[in-house]
Image (cartoon, rainbow, N blue to C red):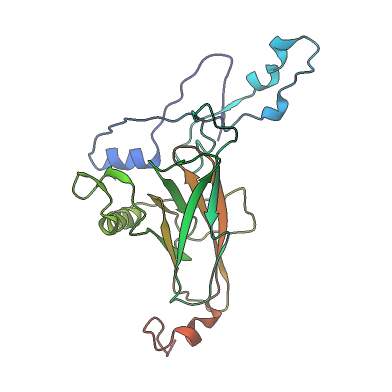
Amino acid sequence: MGYLDNSTVTVDAILTNKGREILASGGRLNITKFALSDDEIDYDLWNPQHTLGTNYYGAVIENMPIIEALPDETQMLRYKLVTLPKDVIGIPVISVTPASISFTSLKQELTVTPSTLNLAGGNSALGYTAILSDDTVATLEVAPDGGIMSTSPVSGRNAIGDVQSTNQLIAAEANATGVTSFLDDEVTSVTTAGKTIIRTGTKFIIRPKLQANTTTIQRALLTIIGNETGGFKTISVTVDPSGFATQDIGSGLVNQTQ
């Protein structure tokens, strides 16, 4: 990571990992939307007490270094600028149910339902992006009733998702390309060993994965990002495999000889 010289107006445009993947496979980019963010800005530095007057209240902010663009879309544009209706009196906040996830059996699955507070209908059009930090801990899919109005990658038509086909296609792409894992700065003490899983929708299903080591509790992070309002919420995912053999024998999920 580096910094740009902000003494002049600079546009630093690069392709994301996904963009590079498309070009490498012979595809063409069809950019139809863009987003702005203020990731580098610390608004606590606004100083209305500056002795030189109003023109200098934001002097420190205006002279802060700007981070150069990165190809990792999970790390850039995390604090997006948004346009809100005039009657909104609070910043939209992403809320996630449940607040944390814990698995003790392979038969378990949980539906993760994000919502947007302080803005009625917030993120209802473009939904949310869910990022699971480690695919060795659990799986992540869009729920059958969690698709959003988009062009289906399978049929090319506008529809509220052929969710099953979309999940399968995204999973195949993820296996074919190395999506790097990441650590979220909101939740600490979690180390990732696998790849990230990224899904887009309004509701998600997460399931634990079989673990080779049944004595070690595995942890991952699930980050939900509002695609329209910006903002994100991160929750912890814990998988305790110590009871898998006891609870799942006979279900066909765990072989009794393991």
- Residue 232 vs 15, above or below: the answer is below
Q: Which of 34 and 93 is in front in this view?
A: 93
Residue at 72% x, 16% y is 57
Residue at 76% x, 9% y is 53
135 left or right of 100 in image: left
204 left or right of 43 in image: left
- Residue 109 vs 129, above or below: the answer is below
Place residue 138 in its image quadrant: bottom left
Residue 199 point in image, percent of width and height: 39, 52
Q: Quadrant of the N terminus?
A: top right
224 left or right of 140 in image: right
Q: Nearer the viewer, residue 176 or 86?
A: 86
Residue 54 point in image, percent of width and height: 72, 11
Extreme front residue here?
87
Residue 87 point in image, percent of width and height: 54, 29
Q: In which quarter of the image is the C terminus?
A: bottom left
Place residue 44 in its image quadrant: top right
Q: How many marks?
A: 0
Residue 55 point in image, percent of width and height: 69, 10
- Residue 165 vs 225, above or below: the answer is below
Residue at 47% x, 76% y is 212
- Residue 47 vs 196, above or below: the answer is above
Q: Tell me if I can see residue 136 in this picture.
A: no
15 left or right of 166 in image: right
Q: Tell me if I can see residue 22 in this picture.
A: yes
Place residue 127 in its image quadrant: top left
Q: Nearer the viewer, residue 78 or 28?
A: 78
Residue at 66% x, 30% y is 42
